[in-house]
Image: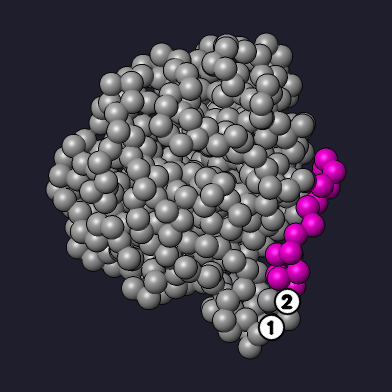
Amino acid sequence: MRSLSRRSRPGSRPIRISACVALLALALGASPGDAARVDDLPVSAATYLGGALDDAAGGAAVAADGTLLVAARLPGHDPGGVASTDLLGGGDGALTRLDASGRQVLQTVRLGDALVDLDLAADGRVAVAAQGLGLVLLAADLGTVAWHDPLPDAVRVATGGDGTALSVAVLTAGRTVRVLDGAGGLRGTRSFGDSVVADVTVAPDGQRVVVTGFNNRTTSGGTPVQVPFVRAFDPTLTTQLWRAYDWTADQVAAQDNSLADCRGVRVAFGADDFLYFAGRTDGGNTTFRFDPLVIDRRLPSDELVSYDPFSNTAGISGSFAITVFGRFEPATGDVLKLQLLLARLSSGNGNTVVPAAIMADASGRVFVGGRAFASIQERDQQRIAGQPVGPYQSGEAFLLAVDPDFLAREVWTVFTAPGGTQNTSVVGVAERAGRVAWSIDVANDTARLLTVDALQPTRDVGTSAYLATRLWTLFGDGFESGDLGAWSASVP
């Protein structure tokens, strides 16, 4: 996606409006360790999109005109009753465009067995990873196919650059990355021998391709450990520009016994041009405590930012998944900010939070989505458009919004409705010009989510897909009086 502002000089701390907000919050009596500022999240719409058969949600995007795009598998179902158009023979894969409010379907096109990911090019064209078809670049109006690269196992897609510098990258389940230009010509291909390659992203200028994942390694003493990596390449994929983490097993063991399994899960370029990373560590003895480029440098507190029990591993025992997310300098791989995110059981011990999506806006506000287990911070106080969330029912979709300085959460919420059993996850988060959209995969036929001004307020049997959106603004009514709980969004 094209960036909306330029970043500061390499290695410097971005100057953000929200940093001033944090100082003002302190003056008004709130500390960085307090709960998220908004516990009642207004949305303009939150809706199911699936039909009677098994559906699945993929990525989401916000177009330049404010309309929303969501990739999915929707067999036999056209959201909103708007007749779909078949491309490349049609199929169960569906790309649906909704108006900016998320309340009206404008069009749906069908192609492939399922659309698992999408990304918007700077010129408005839409790249999709289509199961059974591969990488497909669609015209901005979704009416025609610009080109098609047959790859039956395409799983992730990303775009960067413009015009002759356009780069479209696709990752396959077979751990191959291919980069094509705007006309569909092959710029480069690379097969990876790593245990897992989880994601790929492309810099806004199209001149850097970044991948992440992990390797199963073993120390010389026979201890197995998963070691994450982040690597950057030129668009031909022939030159590695830098790599982060990617240590041997003995090297992480020497980092104060950093033998917790760690994985790279997602990478994305934010609208501020910085590189954002989401990963996981199965315990507190993690390599993420250390500099990704300097193996024996422990991160200081202004880089590994922690301020409460949900952002540090104090008092935990056992092995469970902890999310780690951060901002990196894309030219070098230097880490600028990093933070852990975990849930807490009623006993105080830690519990699992797994990331599946990350994005940042032009100010550096970070959005993370995924699945959380009992319990996120102040879960029993969370509401969606005034509706209290239902009782905890196992792994549930969450959305997190964090200040650019990583010192406070604006929002951390779930979408669980009463009844059923959850197995849901936010799998796509997108932002443009203040409009945020997120997609949720509902991988359980009994799960129920809260809906608001919904096209489909109730769901059918089988698995389902779900989309929500809001216009994210800094201040809301009540700010002047110091009511931090009233900080919210304008919801059209």
Q: Would residue 131 be visible to someone looking at this image?
A: yes
- Which quadrant of the structure image shows residue 103? bottom left
> Residue at left 27%, top 46%?
82
> Residue at left 52%, top 32%?
125
Q: Which mark is residue 54?
A: none
- What residue range appears in magenta? 7-23
Instruction: Tell me if residue 41 is in the magenta stretch.
Output: no
Could you say which is closer to the camera, residue 79 or residue 223? 79
Label count reads 2
Q: Would residue 323 be visible to someone looking at this image?
A: no
- Which quadrant of the structure image shows residue 420? bottom left
The residue beneath circle 1 is 28
Distance Cα–Cα, label 1 vs label 2: 6 Å
Could you say which is closer to the camera, residue 162 or residue 31? 162
Quadrant occupied by the N terminus? top right
Q: Position of residue 172 (x, y in %)?
A: 45, 20
> Residue at left 75%, top 54%?
302
Q: Is residue 366 left or right of residue 371?
A: right
Q: Position of residue 223 (x, y in %)?
A: 51, 25
Amino acid type, callout 2: Leu
Q: Position of residue 471 (x, y in %)?
A: 52, 62
The residue beneath circle 2 is 24
Q: Position of residue 414 (x, y in %)?
A: 39, 61
- Which quadrant of the structure image shows residue 111? top left
Above or below — where is 301 with respect to 443?
Answer: below
Above or below — where is 486 with respect to 146?
Answer: below
Above or below — where is 436 with respect to 58?
Answer: below
> Residue at left 20%, top 59%?
458
Amino acid type, callout 1: Leu
Q: Are marks 1 and 2 in contact (CB under 8 Å)?
A: yes
